Amino acid sequence: MEEPRSDTPEVEATAEEFDLAELGVALPEDKDEAITVLLGELRDARSEAASYLDDLRRVAADFENYRKRATREQQVTVERASERVLAAMLPVLDSFDAALQIEATSETEEKLLGGMRGTHTQLMDVLAKEGLESVPTWGVAFDPEIHEAVMSNGDGSVLNVSQEYRKGYRLRGKVIRAALVALEATDG
C-alpha cells in the first residue's frame, strides 16, 4: 500500500463521519474490498477531474485565440476606416495644394496665404501622425507602383519623373493614390 504524499494533509476520518449514501459509494463489509472500491472511485474521480481540467485549458486557449483574433480584426477595421476617411480627404488636400500655388498680389492676400500655409502644415502633421506620407516624385526614377504616368517625352531606356500633376499618397506604406506624373526618358 502507498504511503501518503507529504504535500497532502493527513486526514483522520472514519466511515461514520461521512454519509456514504450522499457520496454515492456503497462499500462492502470486507475492509480490503472497501479499500479497492475506494481506490477505484479515487482513480475515476481523478480521471474525471483531469478531463475537466483539460477541457478548461482547451476553453481558455480557445478564448485567448478568440481575443487575439478579435483584436487583430478590430485593428484591421480601424485601419480600413482611417484609409477610407483619408482617401476621401485627398481632394481637399488637392484643393489646398492648388490654392497654395497662387501668387499673392497684395498684403491681404499674403496674410491669407500665410494662414492657409499654417493650416495646411497642421493638417499634414496630423495626417502624418496617422501614417499618411506623400509619394516622392521630383528627381526620382519612375516606379509604376507609386507613379501614374500621363505623359512621356524623349527617347531612352531610363524613365525619370520630370513633372508632378497630382500628389500621390501612401498610408502606412500602402499606396492609396498614385502620383500623376510626366516622364522624361534618357539613355541613363
Image: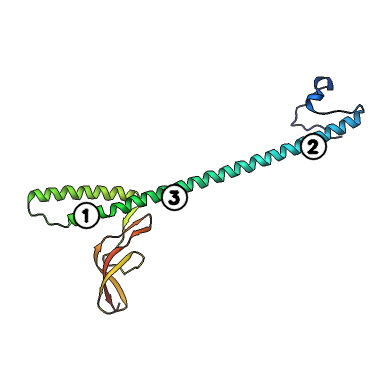
Tell me which label, 2 or 3, sits earlier in the chain: 2
Characterize the local packing of mark 3: few (<14), some (14-19) or many (20 or more) Cα atoms within 10 angstroms: few
Instruction: Find residue 34 and report its horizontal and vertical position in percent.
Output: 88, 30
**Structural distance between the alpha carbons of marks 2 and 1:** 78 Å
Q: What's the amino acid at mark 3?
A: Val
Residue at (78, 27) in percent of width and height: 23
Residue placed under numbered mark 3 in the picture: 76
What secondary structure is marked by label 2?
helix
Instruction: Find residue 143 and report its horizontal and vertical position in percent.
Output: 34, 68
Residue at (16, 49) in percent of width and height: 114
Residue at (17, 47) in percent of width and height: 115
Which quadrant is the C terminus positioned in?
bottom left
Q: Quadrant of residue 179?
A: bottom left
Residue placed under numbered mark 1 in the picture: 95
Q: What's the amino acid at mark 2?
A: Arg
Using the image, determine if residue 30 lies above or below residue 57.
above
Residue placed under numbered mark 2 in the picture: 43
